[in-house]
Each structure stands twice: as structure tokens, then as C-alpha cells.
Image (cartoon, helix red, strand yellow):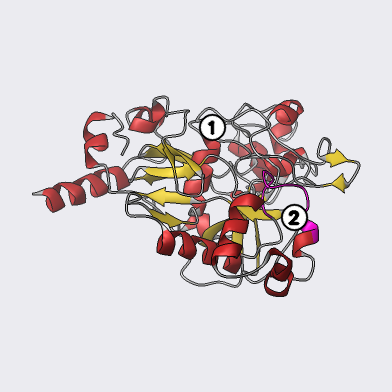
């Protein structure tokens, strides 16, 4: 009966109408999610439990982009040739990109733990040391500028790590974790990442639509400057989002598990999407210390080859425990 119930729940959630806000409010994550760390692992990484739920992923296509001509756009709005509607006027300053559209409803069926912030250099050093590398030998493995790019302290996000490097770190966590840690570590899927970044909101940022407030929540081109130049900053030193997650806007871009396809949102499964099966580039999200406020929006996507390393890209880790079917029935989380 357990398996049958799970299948029925999946089918029911998959059939939720894409535009139904009432359906979203009926799911557990429309309630306030825990805002304090629910788990700390053996190397001090802190995690917050995010409940199963549903959200609107991506951005709305600007109205003027949907039509070949302004006249066609106006006609769709019931307007005449002399009718003025600014939403039909070409806006070359529009920040929404085609690869963020269409906006679509996604259901996260399983509760999971998300890292409180990006993986720090101090945490990554434990991986380096555990596999037998001296810190001064890391350049030979992670690139000749690795130590130089990570000279800003143990509490700063690790950077100049490729998607492959991040995956190696995750494999190491799963291999050496102690018996009391029953979880499984992974890079977040793109959907999981945006789910955590939005934290129950539908605005451009988790704090609203006004980019003027981004400096309170993230490090970016206007505030990530010091005597050493532009650089990543200490994690958790800005305000968290409504679910208690830090640095989802800015500091460093974060690798996700997914391959990139700019048209994927048009064919994305509605339940637990994991991205295209193949590709050339891996998705990273969130914006970084050199980014403009527009690139710190929750929906922004970018991608690069999995072997490439950049001084503005790091990563965040998620952790899975057993599926909490009871949450789908009661809407109450069980922290384990």
C-alpha cells in the first residue's frame, strides 16, 4: 500500500494546474519553513530542512517579446492602432532573459536539507587534506592559481573549483561520513536551488522586486570591494532569505547538478525535474561578487563546461534523508 500511495501522490501533484495559486497554498511549503539549522555534519557544514512543496520556477516572458509586432501585441490586449500600452513597447533594458522562460509550476516531492551557505574554503581544505594533498600542492590539482584565488580566509566560499571538483567533494563526503550521518550528499538540482532561493516568494528576489535592497542580502559589484580588489566575502555576513539560507543572492555563483539547455523550461517535467540527460555545459545560479543586481535575481541562469574553473564560481551542497511521505499528508515537517 505504501508504494501505491506514493504513486498516487506523485500523479496528483503532477496534475496541479500551472497557474493555480490556490494549489500552491495547499502544499506544505506555503507555510513558514524552518529558519534555523536542522543538521550539522562531521566537518561543520550546517543545513536547513526544506519541506516538500510547489513553486513557480523561472520568469514570465515580457509581453512585448511574445509577439512579432507591436500591433499584434496591442491586438492581444484589446487595443487599437492608436491604443498605447507600455507593456507592448520594445524594452531594450528588460532584464528577463529567454532562457528563464516560460514560468512553470514545479513540485518538489521530497523534503531535503540545503546548505546554510556555500561550501567554504575551510571546509574544502578538509577534503584536500583528507585525500593526501598538502595545501601547497593543491595548485597542481585544482589549477595554478587555486591558492591565490582562495587567499581570503577559511570562512569565505571556495572558488576556482570546477563542476567536476565540486562533484569530487560530494563523493568524498558520502565516502567518509560517519555512521551517525545517515544522509546522502549531492549538488542541488536547478529546481531545488531556485526553490531554496525563492523561499516561498514569487518576486524577482526573495526580499521583493526592488534591486536597491540587494546590498542587504548579497555581495555584488557595488559592495564586494576591499583593498585586495573585488573578491568573495565571508559567508553568512548578510541577511538570510525567508527560509534562513544565506548568500543565495550573490557572493559566488553556485554549480548545480543539471546540464544546461536554454529551452528546457518548455519541456520540463512538473515533478522533481533533474535537467536534460546530456549537454555541454553545467548550470550555475545566484550571481557573484562581480555581478550586477539584475544577475542576482532568483530566476537567473548561466552555464559553463563542467571542467572549467572561475574565481567567481563555487557551490552549495544538499543532503537527502528518507522521503517524508507523512509531510504530504499533514504538512508538518519531521526533522531527522
Query: Residue 248, percent across and down?
Result: 61, 40
Residue at disc 1, secondary structure: loop
The residue at the point 68 percent across, 44 percent down is 96
Q: Which residue is mark 2?
A: 150
Q: Which secondary structure class fits the magenta region best?
A: loop
Q: Which residues are magenta?
A: 148-158
The residue at the point 60 percent across, 66 percent down is 165
Q: Which residue is mark 1?
A: 202
Foreground pick, 174 / 202: 174
52 magenta-colored: no
Query: Residue 261, percent across and down?
Result: 57, 63
In the rendered view, does 145 fall on the left or right side of 170?
right
- The reply to whether residue 100 is in sight is yes
Q: Quadrant of residue 82?
A: top right
Query: Residue 326, percent across and down?
Result: 22, 37
Crowd rating for badge 2 (residues with CA inside 10 Å; few <14, some 14–19, many 20+): many
The residue at the point 70 percent across, 37 percent down is 88
Query: Residue 54, percent across and down?
Result: 39, 38
Amino acid at each position: 500500500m505504501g508504494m501505491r500511495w506514493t504513486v498516487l501522490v506523485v500523479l496528483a501533484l503532477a496534475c496541479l494546474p500551472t497557474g493555480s495559486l490556490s494549489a500552491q497554498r495547499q502544499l506544505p511549503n506555503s507555510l513558514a519553513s524552518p529558519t534555523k539549522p536542522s543538521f550539522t555534519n562531521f566537518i561543520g557544514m550546517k543545513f536547513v530542512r526544506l519541506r516538500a512543496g510547489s513553486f513557480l520556477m523561472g520568469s514570465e516572458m515580457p509581453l512585448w517579446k511574445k509577439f512579432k509586432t507591436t500591433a499584434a501585441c496591442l491586438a492581444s490586449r484589446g487595443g487599437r492602432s492608436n491604443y498605447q500600452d507600455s507593456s507592448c513597447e520594445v524594452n531594450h533594458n528588460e532584464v528577463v532573459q529567454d532562457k528563464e522562460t516560460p514560468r512553470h509550476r514545479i513540485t518538489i516531492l521530497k523534503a531535503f536539507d540545503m546548505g546554510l551557505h556555500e561550501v567554504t574554503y575551510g571546509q574544502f581544505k578538509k577534503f584536500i587534506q583528507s585525500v593526501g594533498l598538502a595545501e601547497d600542492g593543491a595548485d597542481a590539482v585544482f589549477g595554478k592559481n587555486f591558492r591565490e584565488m582562495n587567499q581570503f580566509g577559511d570562512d569565505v566560499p571556495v572558488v576556482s573549483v570546477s563542476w567536476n571538483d565540486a562533484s569530487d567533494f560530494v563523493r568524498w563526503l558520502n565516502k567518509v561520513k560517519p555512521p551517525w550521518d545517515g544522509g546522502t550528499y549531492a549538488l542541488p538540482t536547478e529546481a531545488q536551488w531556485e526553490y531554496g532561493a525563492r523561499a516561498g516568494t514569487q518576486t524577482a528576489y526573495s526580499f521583493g522586486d526592488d534591486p536597491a535592497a540587494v546590498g542587504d542580502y548579497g555581495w555584488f559589484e557595488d559592495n564586494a570591494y576591499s583593498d585586495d580588489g573585488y573578491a568573495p566575502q565571508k559567508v553568512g555576513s548578510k541577511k538570510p532569505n525567508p527560509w534562513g539560507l544565506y548568500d543565495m543572492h550573490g557572493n559566488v555563483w553556485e554549480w548545480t547538478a543539471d546540464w544546461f539547455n536554454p529551452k528546457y523550461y518548455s519541456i520540463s517535467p512538473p515533478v522533481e525535474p533533474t535537467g536534460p540527460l546530456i549537454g555541454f555545459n553545467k548550470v550555475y545560479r545566484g550571481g557573484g561578487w562581480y555581478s550586477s543586481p539584475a544577475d542576482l535575481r532568483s530566476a537567473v541562469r548561466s552555464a559553463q563546461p563542467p571542467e572549467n574553473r572561475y574565481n567567481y564560481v563555487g557551490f552549495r551542497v544538499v543532503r537527502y534523508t528518507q522521503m517524508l511521505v507523512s509531510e504530504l499528508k499533514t504538512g508538518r515537517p519531521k526533522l531527522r
